[in-house]
Image (spheres, rainbow, N blue to C red):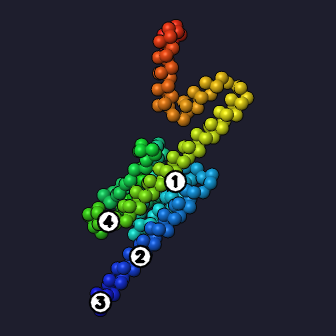
Amino acid sequence: MDDNIEENTSFSNSLIGKESELNCLYNIEEILNSSGISLEQAFSDVLKILPSGFQRPNEIGIEITFKDNNYRTENFSFTNWLISAPIKVQYEEVGIISASYKTSKTKNIDKCFSEDEKKLLKTVANRLGLFALHQDLKNIFMDLKTVKDVSDRKCKSNWRVILDLLRSTNPPLFMRLTRKLLHVLCWNEIDEAQTL
């Protein structure tokens, strides 16, 4: 009889944990799907919601590092009880999200965080990467619209507008294209290209 009560209690606690993780993911998804939200605001809101998906939400600290910016809760600290997941945009690591407890009843990190909590952190990191990619693409489309408007007004030569767009949105591609153009100009024996 006591075994059934303990089993039911364990099962009930497991369901409550799953419910809190799902609610956390739903709330984060709702935030990231909001129109007009900035990266900074999204990260700030995720910091407020993410602790609710963990076993001890009042004790967990969260930090999001994205490019050169850090966002963290007040109770985040680098301790022995820390897990992290990379934030990737198009397979390139652009940040990291970490969760830590200041204290733990166990010294074993694997027992401090459940597999579900580790999976939750990875899922949120993946979703933040997709959100950042979406923001980048939105900025590129806005730049393209600006380029179209500028080219319609014939303020600049078309090739300069395109190069300016490339320089601001994709510097590696801009450098590659510039090197190839310079090579073609040198091949055609243009004196100005030789001095560059």
Q: Are marks 4 and 2 in contact (CB under 8 Å)?
A: no
Can you give x and y, in whole percent of width and height, for residue 34 in the image?
Answer: 60, 57
What is the three-letter code of the residue carrying label 1?
Phe
* Front residue of 47 and 35: 35
Secondary structure under the numbered disc 1 in the rendered image: helix
Circle 3 or circle 1, nearest the eye: 3
Q: CA distance from mark 4 to mark 1?
A: 25 Å
Judge from the rendering whether residue 80 lies leftward or rightward of residue 151; answer left or right.
left
Name the kind of residue labelled 4 in the image: Cys
Q: Contact (CB < 8 A) between labels 4 and 1?
A: no
Q: Which residue type carries mark 2?
A: Leu
Viewer can see residue 72: no
Kindly indicate the quadrant of the structure image that contains residue 51. Answer: bottom left
Q: In the structure shown, which secondary structural element does the residue marked by tag 4 occupy?
A: helix
User: Which corner quadrant of the image does residue 105 belong to?
Assistant: bottom left
The correct choice, above or below, for 6 with respect to 16 in the image is below
Residue under pointer 3: 2
Circle 2 sits on which residue?
Answer: 15
Picture residue at 58% right of the left edge, 50% below the top: 38
Q: Quick one: quadrant of the N terminus?
A: bottom left
**Amino acid under disc 3:** Asp
Residue 96 on image: x %, y % = 41, 50
Residue that appears at 43% across and 49% down: 87
Foreground label between 1 and 2: 2
In the shown orientation, is residue 86 left or right of residue 130? left
Label 1 Cα neighbours within 10 Å, binned few <14 / some 14-19 / many ≥20:
many
Q: What residue is shown with label 1?
A: 43
Q: In screen coordinates, is 125 left or right of 35?
A: left
Looking at marks 4 and 1 on the same chain, the residue that comes earlier in the sequence is marked by 1
